[in-house]
Amino acid sequence: MRRFYACLLAFLPALACAQGATSLSLAEVEALWREHSRELRLAAAMVDAAAGDLKAAGQAPNPELSLNFLQISRNSGTTTGNWLDKKVDSQLRVDQLIERGGKRELRRRSAGARLEAAHLDLADTSRQQLAELRRAYFDLKLLQEKAALATETAALYARGVDAAQKRLKAGDLAPVDVARLGIDQSRADSDARAVQAELVQARQALAYLIGREATASGLSASDPWPLADDEVLADGLPAQRADLEAARRRSQAADAERDLARAKRARDITVGVQYEHYAQNTPVNSYGIGVSIPLFVWHEHEGEIARAEADALTASLQAQKVAAMAGGQWAQARAQLLAARERVRRLDGGLLADAERVAQAAELAYAKGAMGLIDLLDARRTLRQLRVEAVTARADYAKARADWQAQMDSGKTP
């Protein structure tokens, strides 16, 4: 049964390849993401909505046309003909609202700032989603390599158990040692199955970002790990990063809306012209004009002004908060990148190679009877832990590098 499980674990990667595996480079994944990203499409739709708001903000109020029939009674007449022949008074009126206080310009200024913020939001969404995409890609690569290591380890323990059982039959090994090997093999099998489950999740996460959910089970990452080179890191954030600029534009829009609320104190005027037809007795046609203005009897828009002033202050504070948080995120990303780079260099500098030599020597010594089983198992565990640590360190460096690049990306609309 143990041999069956070991063969099954070894067969899983080949089975995935046989079921239509799709090996993708990071560049190919990014191209698919730009084409299928739902988040980018949503952000682009918000740009279209803001463009519509700007168009509406610059439009003058439409005139209103009204037609009224007056003095309708039983004696109004029922003769056929056009409505002017009826003995019914009629009134045709056109009213036009004239805005004062620069309200239209203030609406246009607010909507324009929000449109710019929407464009910047699209760029910032691209910046953040690209970093998430790269993290998902390297998570998949990490789990691919961990799955390969787990499968290799499980197969190693299966061969060890088979050899131990033969030695047990020959009287060359104690039953307790065979039991120890069986326990470690069970652990290795469990680890391999757990990694396979995590690999499925990683494929689904990447598939969602690139719109390949239907073929998620066959996705694989083909690019090598990025080299931990001596990249010179910048000393500060880009001055025009998209999220910072978007927050500033929203603050400008809130300032314009505050001014718009204050401008409501300037009374708008409604001007109307009318044509009147009196059909009673002797028909008479007449014309008239009218002007109406609001009376600030109960309020002068104090509540709206107070709310707009509070919103302007909130937007200003929010812009300051975004800038402060961006600075902290930049510092954290820089520290994580430096730590990850140092960790990769330490493992590549000989630590992993030393562990592999020790494990090989332990296997040889145990085969010749010069080392006990416990020491052999300890050497195997140490090597496996260091291999997992090495691939995890490379993944951490790759993801930290993606986060750093996201921090330094000023944001360009894709």
Image (spheres, rainbow, N blue to C red):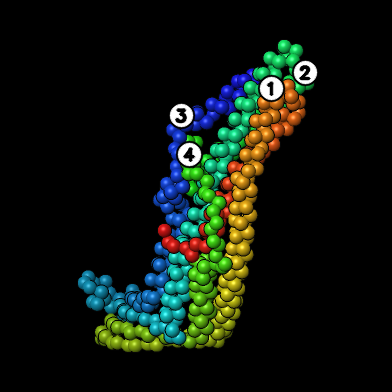
Please state which of residues 301 and 107 is positioned toward the viewer in this rendering: 107
Residue underneath mark 2? 174
- Crowding at label 2, few (<14), some or many (≥20) Cα neighbours within 10 Å? few
- Crowding at label 3, few (<14), some or many (≥20) Cα neighbours within 10 Å? few
Question: Is tag 4's residue or tag 3's residue first in the polypeptide sequence?
Answer: 3
Residue underneath mark 3? 18
**From the viewer's perspective, is the residue at label 1 or at label 2 nearer?**
1
Looking at numbered disc 2 in the image, what kind of residue is underneath it? Ala
Residue underneath mark 4? 219
Give the Cα separation between the discs numbered 2 and 3. Answer: 42 Å
Looking at numbered disc 4 in the image, what kind of residue is underneath it? Leu
Q: Is residue 181 left or right of residue 40?
A: right
Question: Is tag 2's residue or tag 3's residue first in the polypeptide sequence?
Answer: 3
Split into 4 quadrants, where in the image is the N terminus? top right
Residue 393 appears anywhere in the view: no
**From the viewer's perspective, is the residue at label 3 or at label 1 nearer?**
1
Looking at numbered disc 1 in the image, what kind of residue is underneath it? Ala
Secondary-structure class at tag 4 = strand
Give the Cα separation between the discs numbered 3 and 1. Answer: 37 Å
Q: Contact, CB < 8 Å: mark 4 with mark 1? A: no
Give the Cα separation between the discs numbered 1 and 2. Answer: 15 Å
